[in-house]
Image (cartoon, coloured by chain):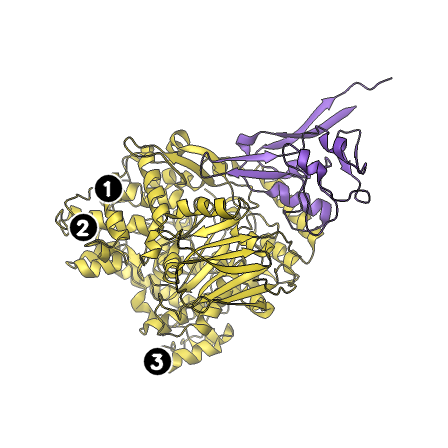
Amino acid sequence: MIVQKYPGADGLAGTTLRINLTTGEIKSLPTDTRLMREWFGGRGAIAKIIYDEVPRDADPLGPKNLFIMSAGVMSGCFIPAGAKIGFGSVSPLTNGHGDSNMGGHLGPTLKFAGYDMVIMSGIAPKPSYLFIDDDVVELRDASQYWGMGSLECEPALKKDLGEDFEIATIGPAAENGILFSCITHDFGRQAGRTGQGAVMGSKKLKAIAVRGTGGIKVHDLAGLTEHVTAIIKRTQTHPNMEPWQKYGTAFFIDWSNKNAVIPTRNFQTTHYENIDGINGEALVEKCLITHKACFGCWMNCGKYTKAVIPGKKTVYLEGPEYETGALCGSNLGMTDINQVAYLNWLLDNVGMDTMSGGGVIAFGMECFQRGLITTDDLEGHTLNWGSVEDAEHFVDMIVNRRGIGDWFAGGTKRAAEKIGRDSIKFAMQVKGQEMSGYDGRHAPGMLLAYMTCDIGAHHNRAWTITVDMAEGRDTVEGRAKVVVYLQHIRPLFDCWCICRLFWGELDIEPEEIVESLNHITGWNIDTAEALKTSEKVWNLVRCHYLERNRANGRTFDYPPARSWEDKIPTGPSAGKGVSKEQVETMLDEYYACRGWDNDGNPSREVLHDLKLDFAADNLEKIGLLGKPLPDGIPAVRGERYKPKAF
Amino acid sequence: MEIKRIKVVSSKCTGCRLCMQICAISHHEEINPRKTRLKIEAHFPEPGVYKPRVCTQCGKCLEVCPENAIYRREDGAFIVIPEKCTNCGECIAVCKPGVIFQHRDLDYVLICDNCFKCTELCNTGAITIHTRVVKEDK
């Protein structure tokens, strides 16, 4: 059908789609410009809509959950790396607000087609895909694509629709309700975290295909062009540009190993003896086909590669980038980059987040190492460190939910609950989501970032690891205020739907990015206002989590006991580790810094300051509103910190 | 006299499309990579390469234009006269690299006019300016 379109405010496409997948009804509405202004689109707008519209008792995989994609206010707007698209829903992995985003070309293309946001409800009666071709929007039959791997479905759809469609797909993992399933686009870009693919699968939505030929109007195109062109030209010669372009984030594999934070064999230790086999050098030397960039990005961190393993078909993929390299490399004891790349492809194609997926396989391997699961549980197979064959068979059991594969389909926390025998101690997750590729035992700020991350353990909200290196790894004092600052500035990029990597790596100041935003939107805001808006999103997401999970926030903010019970056994950080008391101290400082009470619940005072009185009322009704702070709330939460480039 | 055109090294292209964005902004004051005068072909999943396609200045478009709406400027560029172009598409049919474009908002075709804004933003050297000195007739 041809939908009605609406003119967009500066920076916006203009139209929002609301689609009831159960009935097939497609409605087009003018994009809510007030929502975009007050919540910045992307993650922020998604958080507000989910908070307002999804009942607190709704099953994340049921019809009442929403599945939203939003391209934010800056995606596609000639801003460096303005390529992101955000997805959001109540997460089946964490049972709280979940959002995840990816680069590539889909976000800009959605806006070129004329849409800022697509809000989907219900469950399609049969496998379907969303087709958007400028003014034409349809739900189409996806029966012939259902069951295909993510990486196989994308070229199949391009062949049927045209090369100039941008396509997002899910794989069999999402179709089968594996809770850490991802969404894939552009042959290797993923929205991996919080199980957004699982929600898409629960709605029987196999893919999203978009072609757009329109333009985006911005407030001051001449000013924007001059500003952005100057940034691009200035940074072309930045010393970090060359290693970044050459290795992408895989550059950090060596760095993490040298600094003894790389997770090794399910976070048992932090230094890996076979790092040369899986590092950035190995990737470029053995696997690289071409460097690959997202829309409008001059840093091309993407590495398009192939994995060649004797006896297996040669596979093509994007990656492994750092997180996959660590979590499917050292964390599984893999010794060769081709093994890591093959597992990267395997998980991408079945549609599992390589971060949670790597964490889940590693947890399984440690259970096998300790005899908690045996070959009898594994259909006669072993599950040994460093074995691609074992990992591949285990993944197949999980994807198809065979035997104990079903236990692991919900991630490490749920698997540990089934396995018992204290395995929860080394289920490396917080709030049900697996940790990223940094061990926090000798990087306490990073540990606090995982503990307090609003969507379960995830590095991206506050990549504190470099702060630990710079400020001291044996002390925890003072780390909270930096974590809070990072939790405000970094998610801003997820609201705006632009990549954050250039900010930290190329010395581009937040004020320069806000200036770009003002050229695009005409809002004329400053960095302080931007940060406060991000803080508002953070607090709303916290309230949402408490309203759904009904206990004091502090109870959810602890890492697995390995974090304080097991000192690091080997490598440069041997003997190091935080204590339980230090974990408690960090939480105390963190809550005070946020204006939350010592139980980890937001106080009315801070919620009022953020114009979230409605959320305070809701918390009060269920007895989880934070008590007033004895000394009042800090005037500004978080302390600005300039990350040091490495 | 100097003849200029865009030189391509495909293996250096990362598919970022900054070239297409600045092309549209420069010529149409609009963020819309569909209003472009060059394109990036993506060949994925196999073999996994990008191929920038640019005007090679072969002149076939000028030869077939029934309206005399294209002329060659002395720097080598083939320039479309929007007022004369009827958007008939005959030039598109003979353009081997496929770099003459139409857009639904425009009633004339788009051909590279050697502004070279794209080469300024290309961060990998995939597209650069190629200059050839030609002796002038006396």
Disc 2 residue crowd, few under 14, some 14–19, many 20+, Cα 10 Å: many
Chain shown in purple: B
Q: Is residue A23 visible?
A: yes
Q: Residue A623 got which mark?
A: 3
Please count the marks in the image: 3
Same chain for labels 3 and 1? Say yes or no. Answer: yes
**Drawn side of residue A171 relative to residue A245, left or right:** left
Letter of the chain that mark 2 sits on in the rendering: A
SS under mark 1: loop
Q: CA distance from mark 3 to mark 1?
A: 46 Å
Image height of A84 relative to A636, above or below: above
Chain shown in yellow: A
**Residue A615: x, y in percent?**
44, 76
SS under mark 3: loop
Q: Residue at x 39, y 47 (%)?
A: A469
Q: Residue A570 got which mark?
A: 1
Question: Of A384 and A168, which appears nearest the observer?
Answer: A168
Which of labels 3 and 2 is toward the front? 2
Letter of the chain that mark 3 sits on in the rendering: A
Amino acid type at circle 2 is Cys
Q: Residue A367 got which mark?
A: 2
Question: Of A408 and A435, which appears nearest the observer?
Answer: A408
Q: Earlier in the sequence, mark 2 or mark 1?
A: 2
Please identify the quarter of the rendering in which residue A66 is found: bottom left
Amino acid type at circle 1 is Thr
Disc 1 residue crowd, few under 14, some 14–19, many 20+, Cα 10 Å: some
Q: Are marks 3 and 1 in contact (CB under 8 Å)?
A: no
Q: Earlier in the sequence, mark 3 or mark 2?
A: 2
Q: Residue at x 27, y 54 (%)?
A: A428
Task: Quarter of the image for the N terminus of chain A: give it.
Answer: bottom right
